[in-house]
Image: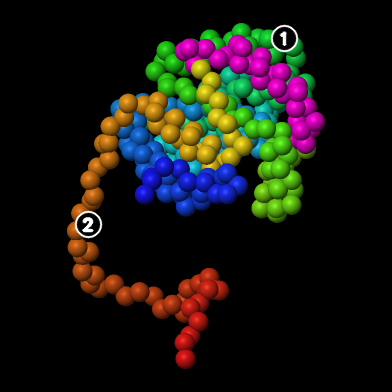
Amino acid sequence: MSNGPKFTKKGKLDARYYNRELARLQAELVRLQYWIRARNERVVVVFEGRDAAGKGGTIKRISECLNPRAASIVALATPTEREKTQWYFQRYVAHLPAAGEIALFDRSWYNRAGVERVMGFCTDDQYNEFLRACPRFESLLIRSGIRLIKYWFSVSPQEQERRFQSRIHNTVKRWKISPMDLESRQRWVEFSQAKDMMFEHTDNKLSPWFVVESDDKKRARLNCIQHLLSQFDYQDVVPGPIELPPRPKVSGYVRPPRSEQTYVADQYLVPETS
């Protein structure tokens, strides 16, 4: 029996195959994190792309099995009035990793080259200065020893529209769509032009952009994780199983009566059988 990818009749990745492969890759991510901590590496992964391109879902799958003390998700809100007066990169620098840590940027300093440019939230001078300064900024990060990896998630207008409609009609996803998303929907061409200009200035050999085709979310997640793992020549340094000693015998302790404590009602009791 083939162990290769399996697909549905509609050409989507089979859910059972996807879950097995995701579990395998997440185990590798744990091994990678142990290696990063053992080597005191500092890793920054930038995720950019259009709204509803699948960045957040990929970040969630990467991080969900990692130790959160050493793997942070950086998703900054709109800058405050004070932050707007700072050096542009300043608030991002505060979230860079220390030794043994991974920082996953759910959008990053590239806001200036994307949404700020298209929506008019920055001046032409600020935008042009960003395009000049960004490659130098990233060069400084890399020279300092930080491993910088940048992903651009590419989604078609048809798939983006389908995902927007899904969010509108799904209560638990409705928070994902904002007035800014609706405005960006009207400016597809402007965002394409901004992305092209951003790549022209910041896609280089030292710090390249890696494009992830994301119309199929499951394939995009697996492809991204596979690629991320391939960027490190890591070894398995996960410690072996811990042997738990026998529990010490309890003597002299009496638990307070249950009636003296307030319990959450159990709404999911096993039904009694007759």
Q: In the image, what residue type sits under mark 2?
A: Leu
- Horizontal side of residue 81 vs 214, given as left or right: right
Q: Position of residue 97 (x, y in %)?
A: 44, 28
Q: Position of residue 54 (x, y in %)?
A: 60, 38
- Residue 85 to residue 185: above or below: above
Q: In the image, what residue type sits under mark 1?
A: Asp
- Residue 173 to residue 78: above or below: below
- Horizontal side of residue 36 vs 11, given as left or right: left
Q: Position of residue 124 (x, y in %)?
A: 74, 11
Q: Identify the residue under disc 2.
A: 244
Pointer 1 and pointer 2: residues touching (CB < 8 Å)? no
Q: Residue furthest bottom?
A: 274
Residue 125: assigned label: 1
Q: Residues within 10 Å of mark 1 (few under 14, many from 20)?
A: few
**In magenta segment, residue 193:** yes
Task: Look at the image and tell me whether residue 217 can be seen.
Answer: yes
**What colour-coding does the image apply?**
rainbow
Give the main secondary structure of the magenta stretch: helix
- Disc 1 is placed on an element classified as helix
* Residues in magenta, as a range: 180-207
